[in-house]
Amino acid sequence: MKLIRVAIERYKCFKSNTILEIAPLTIIVGRNNSGKSALLQLIHLLCGNMGASNGDQRNFLNLNVDGIRHARTFRDLINGRALHGNLNMTLVFADRNNIEIKLSLTIQNISISSLASEFQERIINWKLDYDGQMFKASIENLELNSSYIVSGFGICENTFPIHWQGILPRTSTQLPEWVNEQVDAMKKWSQDIRYLRYPRNFQSSALSINESHTHYHHPTGIHAPFILAKSDEIRNSVQKWYRTAFNLNLYVKMSGEYFDLMVGSKNQKNNVLLEFSGEGLSQVLPVAVTALTSASIQSGIDIFEHPESDLHPAAHAHVAELLLNTVSPSKRPMILETHSEIILLRLRRWIAERRLLPENVLIYWVDSDSEGASSLTKITINERGAVSTWPHGVFTEDYEEVMAIRRAVRDLHEMM
């Protein structure tokens, strides 16, 4: 199963219906505060609410996923924080036979008492389409304990309560078998989503080797050192990449049951703890660990916020090579948010050199209007590495600065 498309409406700064297609590599670019991170966080939020029960069946969205709090209240997710607002969301997957599985739902903010502050979210419409079959559940009224009117192709209209686990129903004999099967498949898929936020945050010293974080991924990157320490294969791959990108040795220094992550020159002189070696070298470690373990995980998706953060521009090309080497239609998709012009240039070069097929890449420019409403512009790349369109004024700073210098020099000469 693969996620191939996401559609949202009235989510945060995205007021109108917004569609994000997911390619093997999807890149999100745009100015600050345009809504880039909101898109990435939405996928993490929804996937974190597939099958995970927060212990309160009245709450359909757990806003705290993997320790990342996406909002204070459900109302904070609604465009304009409308008091009685709702969110429309659609997730489209493809199964192993490339048959689409389309999940659509509407979550409404409803009043549960006469107090203005007493509100709760509730799924009022839920629909699943798969291979010519359709199942739809619509709430009878906005009372918390109301049952759902269930209908669909080949299903007699019926009314019964649905017990939810996040945004998916709990498996039930009242549901059609094909619905239970697809819901179980989505729950399994969601377990392998890996979202790496920025800034990353972890320590690299006095770590206990006995802590079991070998496979578990965390959005802050705090488990990357343990994965590195416990796997010779991953450690060797990451060490090789650090030598190529930074001409430095990265190694694990053991002391009893504890270990430190160290970096130093090739001759092992001037070795220091990774956390004291410069912010960029620390911030990129979870990126390298996540990228180099991608091939071992079949389903799910990898999401990176600013993998190039705090690195010198000369290292951006190495980060690009690291990530581009993992892109393949047969592997898990990757979504990348970046401000790096060099990463985009290296991507276009790979396509022009036939190292990457253009149909496996999509770029989205995120922009907002004068009222703060955000929208997406899809940008494709042809086989020569040329982009289909590009927003005016984007990544032209170098050119504009050079022209300004030339004008200043010319004016100076004219004055002399």
Image (spheres, rainbow, N blue to C red):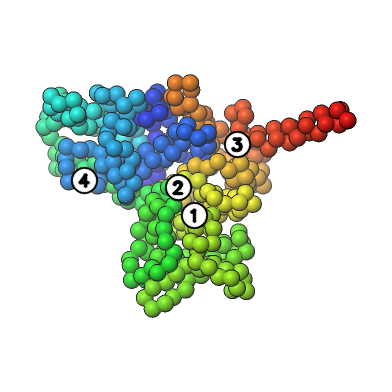
Question: In the image, what residue type sits under mark 2?
Answer: Tyr
Residue under label 2: 198
- Visible in this render: residue 182? no
Mark 1–mark 2 distance (CA, rounded to whole Å): 8 Å
Secondary structure type for disc 4: loop
| Residue extending furthest toward the right | 416
Q: Nearer the viewer, mark 3 or mark 4?
A: 4
Secondary structure type for disc 2: loop
Mark 1–mark 4 distance (CA, rounded to whole Å): 31 Å
| Residue extending furthest toward the top | 370
The disc, 4 or 2, on the residue closer to the chain's N-terminal end is 4
Can you give x and y, in whole percent of width and height, for residue 356 in the image?
Answer: 59, 47
Q: 10 Å neighbourhood of mark 1: few (<14), some, or many (≥20)?
A: many
Residue under label 1: 283
The disc, 3 or 4, on the residue closer to the chain's N-terminal end is 4
Residue under label 4: 54
Q: Identify the residue at horizontal 26%, vertical 39% (top origin).
A: 61
Asked whether the residues under the numbered discs 4 and 2 touch, taking CB atoms below 8 Å apart as contact, a structural biologist would say no
The disc, 2 or 3, on the residue closer to the chain's N-terminal end is 2
Question: In the image, what residue type sits under mark 4?
Answer: Asn
Residue under label 3: 381
Q: Nearer the viewer, mark 3 or mark 1?
A: 1
Mark 2–mark 3 distance (CA, rounded to whole Å): 27 Å
